[in-house]
Image (tube, grey):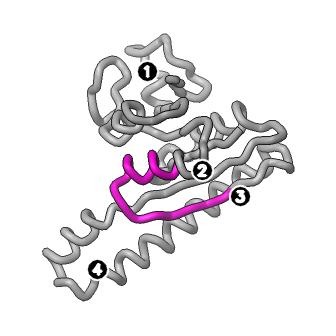
Amino acid sequence: MRVLVAIDDDTLISPIEDFVAAAFSHHGTIIKLLHVIEPSQVTDTVTSMSGHGETRKILEERMKAASSLLNDVRNDLHPKLLASVPIEISVLLGTPHRVILDTAEESQSDVIVLGSHGRGDLSRLRINSVSYAVLSHAECAVTVVKPRKWVESEDHPSKSADTGAHTLA
């Protein structure tokens, strides 16, 4: 089984790691950790503050920070998985939902795992626009992992307090 795990930032790492370790720790699994940096957000902010010269430097710093984040996730996951489960990392530039979908297709992923902060309010799932776009267009199963505090709230007693994951095929 090929699993693409899209990591946005460090706020959802623990529930994502717990879900991935519980669901995909078996022989034959290949896990790919992905972080997408959206250049337009960096370019717009930096250009408005410092001009064009700083953009490349900021992108390189973000790429380095993202690689470090994914290496930390890989190091945290390894002891929770079977030793035979490889974990690849990839940091790419682009529009997050498009890069996630393209990477899933290119790597022939069977499932995409991604987090959602629940900042949007799309139906009862309360998922963000990236999660919604991936759910809407993915050709494989998608699991959206929610923050534990949202999952454990009394407003949503039907959600799993263990991982906060929703799987949609």
- Segment colored magenta: 88-103
Q: Nearer the viewer, mark 1 or mark 3?
A: 3
Q: Tell me, yes or no, if residue 145 can be seen here.
A: no
- Of badges 3 and 4, the one in the foreground is 4
| Residue visible at 63% across and 34% down in the picture | 19
Q: CA distance from mark 1 to mark 2?
A: 36 Å
Q: Determine which residue is flagged by label 1.
A: 153
Residue 45 drawn at (x, y percent)? 20, 69
* In magenta stretch: residue 32: no
Residue designated by label 4: 55
Q: CA distance from mark 1 to mark 3?
A: 30 Å
Amino acid type, mark 1: Ser
Name the quadrant containing residue 118: top left
Marks 3 and 4, how far apart at CA: 30 Å
Q: Nearer the viewer, mark 1 or mark 4?
A: 4
Which residue carries the number 2 mark?
107
Q: Residues within 10 Å of mark 4 (few under 14, many from 20)?
A: some
- Where residue 47 sits in the image (x, y, percent)? 18, 77
Q: Quadrant of residue 119?
A: top left
Q: Kindly report the distance in space between the C-alpha atoms of the residues bearing marks 4 and 2.
A: 30 Å
- Tell me which label, 4 or 2, sits earlier in the chain: 4
Instruction: Decide if residue 88 is on the left or right side of residue 16.
Output: right
Rounded to the nearest angstrom, the CA distance separating label 1 from label 4 is 41 Å
Displayed quadrant of residue 155: top left
Give the labeled residue for mark 3.
75
What residue appears at the point 54 percent right and 27 percent down from the top-left corner? Answer: 165
Quick one: SS at disc 1? Answer: loop
Q: Residues within 10 Å of mark 2 (few under 14, many from 20)?
A: few
SS for dot 2: loop
* Residue projecting furthest to the top: 158
**Amino acid type at mark 4:** Thr
Residue 56 percent across, percent down from the top left: 34, 82
